[in-house]
Image: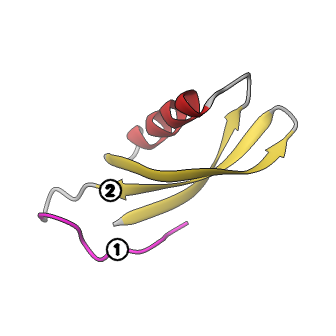
Amino acid sequence: MIVSKRIKIPRDGVDSTQLLEHLQEHFSNTLTGEVLRFAIVEVIGEDLIVDASIMVKDAGTKGKTGGGIHG
């Protein structure tokens, strides 16, 4: 299953590697999976608004499931 979500991240000189680390940390609090893609969609003051998608690992099945984009 693929989950898509918009996340607010402080932009304190963050580079793409640090941005990916922020996303992985954010998702690891609720989901287990791999970040597939992310894009900065907006900058508001000192924050980046990032649209990110994660492939959620489903312990009950093997391989990919159909899934879809959810927000």
Q: Dot 2 lies on which element? A: strand
Q: Residue at x 51, y 39 (%)?
A: 23
Q: Nearer the viewer, residue 61 or 37?
A: 37
Q: Amino acid at mark 2?
A: Val
Q: Residue at x 39, y 39 (%)?
A: 28
In percent of width and height, residue 2 lies at 39, 64
Q: Quadrant of residue 58?
A: bottom left
Q: Is residue 67 magenta?
A: yes
Q: Dot 1 lies on which element? A: loop
In percent of width and height, residue 10 lies at 71, 30
Q: Amino acid at mark 1?
A: Gly
Q: Residue at x 22, y 67 (%)?
A: 64
* Quadrant including the N terminus: bottom left
Distance of mark 2 from mark 1, alpha carbons? 9 Å
Contact between labelled residues 1 and 2, with CB atoms less than 8 Å apart: yes
Image disc number at residue 14:
none
User: Which scheme is used to colour this image of the protein?
Assistant: secondary structure
Q: Nearer the viewer, residue 16 or 21?
A: 16
Q: Which residue is mark 1?
A: 67
- In the image, 69: left or right of 58? right
Q: Magenta part mainly helix, strand or loop?
A: loop
Q: Is 29 above or below relative to 64?
A: above
- In the image, 62: left or right of 41? left
In percent of width and height, residue 61 lies at 13, 65
Q: Is residue 63 magenta?
A: yes
In percent of width and height, residue 22 lies at 54, 33
Magenta-highlighted residues: 62-71
Image disc number at residue 56:
2
Within 10 Å of disc 1 (Cα), the crowding (few <14, some 14-19, many 20+) is: few
- In the image, 31: left or right of 9? left
If you read the primary sequence from the N terminus, does the residue marked by circle 2 or circle 1 appear first? 2
Q: Nearer the viewer, residue 38 or 26?
A: 38
